[in-house]
Amino acid sequence: MSKIVVIGSGINGLSAAALLAKKGKSVTVLESATQFGGAVRTEEVTLPGFKHDLFATNLSLFAGGGVMAALKDDLIRNGLEFVPSAKPYCSVFPDGKSIGIVMDRDANIATLTRVAPGDVESWKSLTVKLGELAPHLFPILGTELPSFAAAKSLYKTWRAIGTQGLFDLIRLLLQSSRAFTDEHFVHPETKALAAIWGMHLDYGPDISGGALFSFLESIGGQEFGMVLGKGGADNLIKALVAVIKENGGTLVSGAKVTEILTNNGKATGVKTADGKIYEATKIIANVNPSLIPNLLPMSEAEKPEIAKVKNFRPGLGTMMIHLALSDLPDWKASEARGFNYVHIAPYVDDLAMTYTVAAAGKLPTTPALVIGQPTVSDPSRAPEGKHILWIQVRVLPLEINGTTWDQVGEEYADQIIENIEQYAPGLKGKILSRKVLTPTDLERYNANLIKGDSLGGSHHPAQFFFLRPLPGWTGHKSPIENLFICGSGTWPGGGVGGGSGLMVANLLSK
């Protein structure tokens, strides 16, 4: 019987393990940390009773993805419970204006008519466009690249939308967020509303490729809303772990893999820090691809086709600030209190400046802020009447010129709170406790978050789609026979979706 070892228990490693165990495969998951879940982790890091998602929080991709479709009954039976939000996001602006997007097209048109009347017709047309493209775009996210299935899907797309439609789609895939928003909107508020979604990944407004995410996420929020995990994102992790165990799989925490064992160019097992050896016929590395050569014998790691993966580039850094609050912020734009995400950009030029400054190794004065208010939808995450704030600071330097994150992290977090105070006066007086996780702290929690890159590698076109992580390492296969790769460093990239885990499971189920 084949033995499959999974290195790392991120969402993709656990998804692959659960799917394979369900199909009767012998699966062992090895995790170096004391908890399973990788970048999906919930802890009481401020005060007792306040449950914070330390890193990822939005589970929408998983809820609508292939792993959920395959394991839905098993996961629900093992405690998975989603909390949907019909008020997914809004953007607030210095003058007190805001644009909030809800799962109600008419309500959104009313909002835009009031705040950005010149963009009403474009918003309507983009809504129609998403409806036309969704049947062609979303299946690709669950299809191996490159593959015959992907080519077949592309052919079907061409048949459906024609040559001009296909060229328009390719153009969208290559556009920057600024080009996309300039083309479709006239109001700076609407442009910022869409462009900020590119910054959730590694797309400054002028980086090619950002338009797709600005389009999908801004309009997609209206169509699909947002999904959180009941009581914390680790609700999903606990359910996946339970599915693996009930199907005979084994999970070991505190088991740091130090070497992938090979014989004649084939992976044969792994060795952990305590000297234990786990033999395997197949190995799945849910590991940042650039770290894999460090786990291989020197004779393999120095081969050109192996060593080149070290050139896989990280995205820029992220800081997380977690607040325990006595009450929700009193936003100047009062309607913002009801949304799961509040974006502070505030405008496209600010996003561009932030990206340029961070890439140059300097601290942005007003970085883009993604502020999660999960207790709006899920009050179980805090004691009665209290709230938490999940603050993601995007984007930041991987290394700061002349200093370190350990030296300036808390001071910089103070500046971020001051920035939010301009939009929500009195916030500081509501803070009961806070926990700051700098980019350096992110890497300490999880070695795959290299220098605080929370995306598992930059998503720029040169290492995305069929080029992710880079040629010779695509298709979720490594140059080492029997060594497969998954995670956000592989297609379809970042986010809590489990897509690459599903693809690897499909490969090993044949």
Image (cartoon, grey):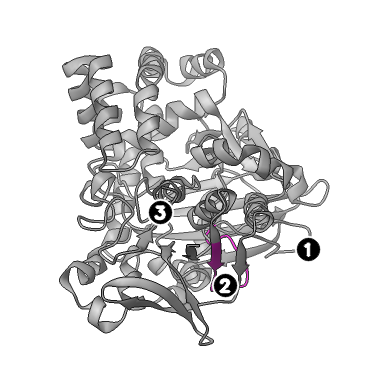
Residue 48's label in the rendered image is: 1
Which stretch is magenta?
A: 27-39
Q: CA distance from mark 2 to mark 3?
A: 18 Å
Chain-order first, disc 2 or disc 1: 2
Q: Inspect the magenta stretch and tell me whether residue 159 lies in it.
A: no
Q: Quadrant of residue 48?
A: bottom right
- Write down the residue under mark 3: 488
* Residue 403 visible in the displayed image: no
Badge 1 element: loop
The residue mark sitting in front, 2 or 1, is 2
**Mark number, residue 223:** none
How many circles with numbers are drawn on the protein? 3
* Disc 3 residue type (three-letter): Ser
Residue at x 47%, y 21% (from the top left corner): 115
In the image, taking residue 20 as reference, residue 360 lies left or right, namely left
Determine whether label 3 and label 1 are within 8 Å by CB: no
